[in-house]
Amino acid sequence: MATWFNKQSRLVQIILLLIPVVNWVIEILVRWSAFLKTKSVLTLVVAILVTFLGLAFGWLDLVWCLLFKHLIFAKA
C-alpha cells in the first residue's frame, strides 16, 4: 500500500489526504504496510500513533506530502 500511494500523482495523494475519514484510512494502511515491509521500530511506533491519533498526523502528512511526495517515515 505504501508503494501504491507513493506511485500516485501528487494531486491524487493530496486529495486522499484532504478528506478526513479517507485520510485516516489511507494513513493506517500506508503506515502498517510500511512497517510490514521495513520491520523498523520507528515505523511501528508511528503506525501505532497514527492508528489512534490519525487526524493529527494526517494534516502534518498533507504538508509533508506536498513537499516531498511521500508520507513521513513511510517512504517504502
Image (cartoon, grey):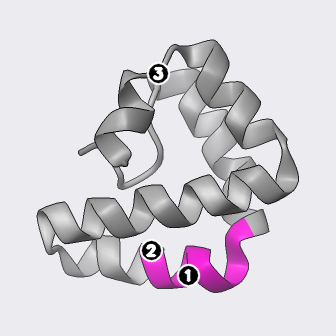
- Disc nearest the viewer among 1 and 3: 3
Amino acid type for the residue under numbered disc 1:
Leu
Residue at point 75% right, 51% down? 22
Count of marks placed on residues: 3
Residue 55 versus residue 47 in the image, above or below? above
* Residue 55 placement (x, y as % from top left): 78, 65
In reply to whether residue 51 is colored magenta, the answer given is yes
Category of crowding for the residue at label 3, using alpha-carbon neighbours closer than 10 angstroms: few (below 14), some (14–19), many (at least 20): few
Residue at the (44%, 55%) spot, across then down:
30
Badge 2 is on which residue? 46
Between disc 2 and disc 3, whose residue precedes? 3
Residue type at the position of mark 2: Val
Write the residue at 57% across / 37% down: 64
Mark 2 → mark 1, Cα distance in angstroms? 5 Å
Determine the CA span between mark 1 and mark 3.
Answer: 24 Å
User: What's drawn in magenta, residue-wise?
Assistant: 47-54
Q: Label 3's element?
A: loop
**Residue 68 in picture, x, y percent from top left:** 45, 26
Give the residue at mark 1: 49
